[in-house]
């Protein structure tokens, strides 16, 4: 169950990472509403992906 949660968290965070990166580059979903928030969300979702992957690799 915990491996599933790691994969699920990584997948959701990866989707959010791509969504906000696309908004930062092309302004498609949110029309570049706030660039600073896009950068903050990209960094945070990238961190969650990294932590999820590391947690998945540490499990037996």
Image (cartoon, rainbow, N blue to C red):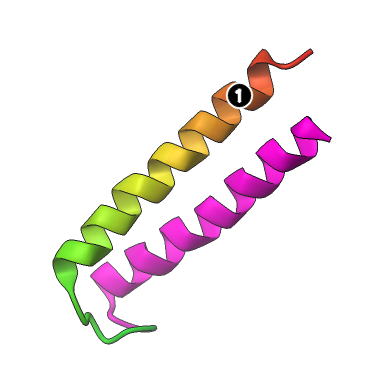
Q: Is residue 4 above or below residue 40?
A: above
Task: Say whether residue 14 is left or right of residue 39.
Answer: right
User: Residue 40's x, y, as percent?
Assistant: 25, 54
Taking the view exactly as shown, the residue that stands out farthest to the front is 1
Residue occupying the point 36% across, 70% down: 22
Q: Secondary structure at mark 1?
A: helix
Q: Nearer the viewer, residue 41 or 26?
A: 41
The residue at 78%/40% (across/down) is 4
| Residue 20 colored in magenta in the image | yes
Q: In screen coordinates, is 29 left or right of 38? A: right
Q: Which residue is mark 1?
A: 55
Measured as percent of width and height from the top left, residue 5 is found at 72, 41
Is 57 above or below relative to 46? above
Q: Is residue 13 left or right of residue 28?
A: right
Looking at the image, residue 60 lies above or below residue 23? above
Q: Nearer the viewer, residue 24 or 8?
A: 8
Q: Assign the magenta stretch its main secondary structure.
A: helix
Q: Count the marks.
A: 1
Q: What's the residue at 77%, 32% (across, down)? A: 2
In the rendered image, residue 43, in percent from the top left (x then y), is placed at: 30, 46
Q: Position of residue 42 (x, y in %)?
A: 33, 54
Q: Is residue 13 magenta?
A: yes
The quarter in which the N terminus is drawn is: top right
Residue at 43% x, 68% y: name it.
19
Give the magenta range: 1-28
**Classed neighbour count for the residue bearing mark 1: other residues with Cα under 10 Å, few (<14), some (14–19), many (≥20):** some
Is residue 39 depicted above or below 7 in this figure?
A: below
């Amino acid at each position: 169950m915990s491996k599933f949660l790691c994969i699920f968290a990584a997948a959701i965070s990866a989707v959010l990472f791509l969504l906000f990166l696309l908004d930062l580059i092309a302004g498609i979903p949110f029309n570049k509403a706030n660039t600073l928030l896009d950068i903050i969300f990209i960094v945070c979702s990238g961190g969650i992906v990294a932590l999820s992957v590391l947690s998945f690799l540490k499990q037996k």
